[in-house]
Amino acid sequence: MLFCVLLLLAGAGALALYLMEKLRRYSVKAVLRKGLVSALFVALAACAWYCSAKDGGPKILGVFVIAGLVFGLLGDIWLDLKYVFPQADEPFTYAGFASFGIGHVLYCAGLALQFALPGKAAWIWLPLLPAVLAGLCIGLLEKPMKLQYGKFKPVVLVYGALLFSTVLLSGSMALLHGWAEKTPNLFFVGAILFAVSDLILSGTYFGRGKERPVDLLLNYLTYYPAQFLIAWSLLYL
């Protein structure tokens, strides 16, 4: 438990150092600092999973969350490299979407395997229907939100459905267990922060005039707490 707390504090410190560099300029140094912050949420998840395993053996969710966080780390790197090497913007953007999309698939699979109850399959598939609709709404709201997805629109729609699947499925699993299980409860809060972060990020990627320092700060100050909270949730398995 103490080591988990130390990793959390280290993550906060590394995030501060990253933001100091990122707000000054786009650089390889910023990418490396960002990679360190992301590596720390992976380490926190591994530590939390190890601690929880002492009380009855390792739980399957840990495997999926750690794998999902690793893909999150990769996505973080790809999406920062697109600024350092703007000539390769397209492949890095696609790589980022793919990495985070895989991460959400892993999150959803782990939640379903860990918290589903016999005869309660509807609690898994029912949340996925509004998640798909939410993904479609992201496309329909492109003009009202003054965004231009361009060639990335199909990817944005699929990713949106996966993102909201994590939010709604974690909420469904928390509700299924009467909000008595800390892991899905914390996961749900983390997933909401993740969605808020991505909604902010969509403005910086596909909108105009939305790349102000405050926008970048709000993005990272919702995204990283989301990932660290998801990692921390493994402590209560």
Image: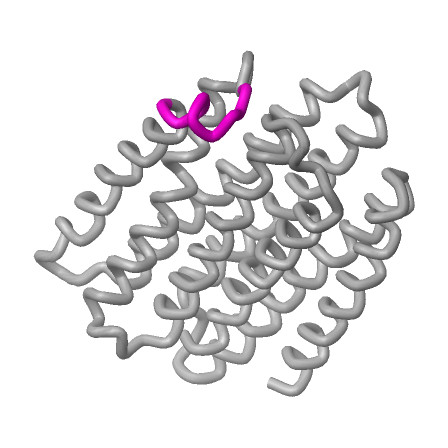
Residue 58 lies in quadrant? bottom left
Span shown in magenta: 140-148
Residue 40 drawn at (x, y percent): 71, 63
The vertical placement of 111 against 145, above or below, is below
Task: Identify the residue at horizontal 77%, vertical 51% (top origin).
Answer: 34
Residue 144 drawn at (x, y percent): 42, 26
Residue 13 drawn at (x, y percent): 79, 69
Task: Residue lying at the far bottom in this picture: please name it.
Answer: 2
Looking at the image, residue 77 sits to the left or right of residue 57; the answer is right
Helix, strand or loop: magenta stretch: loop
Q: State yes or no: residue 145 in magenta.
A: yes
Task: Identify the residue at horizontal 48%, vertical 19% (top origin).
Answer: 153
Looking at the image, residue 120 sits to the left or right of residue 67; the answer is left
Looking at the image, residue 94 sits to the left or right of residue 83; the answer is left
Task: Identify the residue at horizontal 13%, vertical 49% (top origin).
Answer: 122
Q: State yes or no: residue 121 in magenta.
A: no
